[in-house]
Amino acid sequence: MLSTISQENELTFDIAFALPRSPVRGLRRAFTDEERRIIAKHIVEHLKLCCWRFELSAPAPAHGTRTSPP
């Protein structure tokens, strides 16, 4: 089970990762990696102030992985 702190870190990373991939023109080069991390951290802090709770679900099974015995 991940702690709340590590879940927040995962969410921060995921937001920072998604920023340059958004459909907003010019955003990919608008910020450095460090600036994107800072933006993402502030987004997570704001969500916490709004009483959001974060929960990282279990990863989906890999493609082609059997989920039941043959």
Image (cartoon, helix red, strand yellow):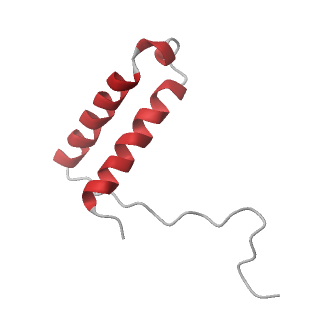
Q: Position of residue 47 (x, y in %)?
A: 25, 44
Quick one: which residue is furthest to the right in this view? 70
Left or right, 29 with respect to 13, comes to right
Left or right, 53 with respect to 30, comes to left
Residue at point 55%, 63% (across, down): 59
Left or right, 16 with respect to 28, comes to left
Foreground of the two, 23 or 19: 19
For the C terminus, the quadrant is: bottom right
Left or right, 8 with respect to 31, comes to left
Q: Position of residue 24 (x, y in %)?
A: 50, 19
Residue at point 45%, 28% (across, down): 19
Q: Is residue 53 above or below residue 14?
A: below
For the N terminus, the quadrant is: bottom left
Quick one: which residue is furthest to the bottom in this view? 69
Residue at point 31%, 55% (across, down): 6
Q: Position of residue 65 (x, y in %)?
A: 74, 70
Q: Position of residue 49 (x, y in %)?
A: 16, 45
Quick one: which residue is furthest to the left in this view? 49
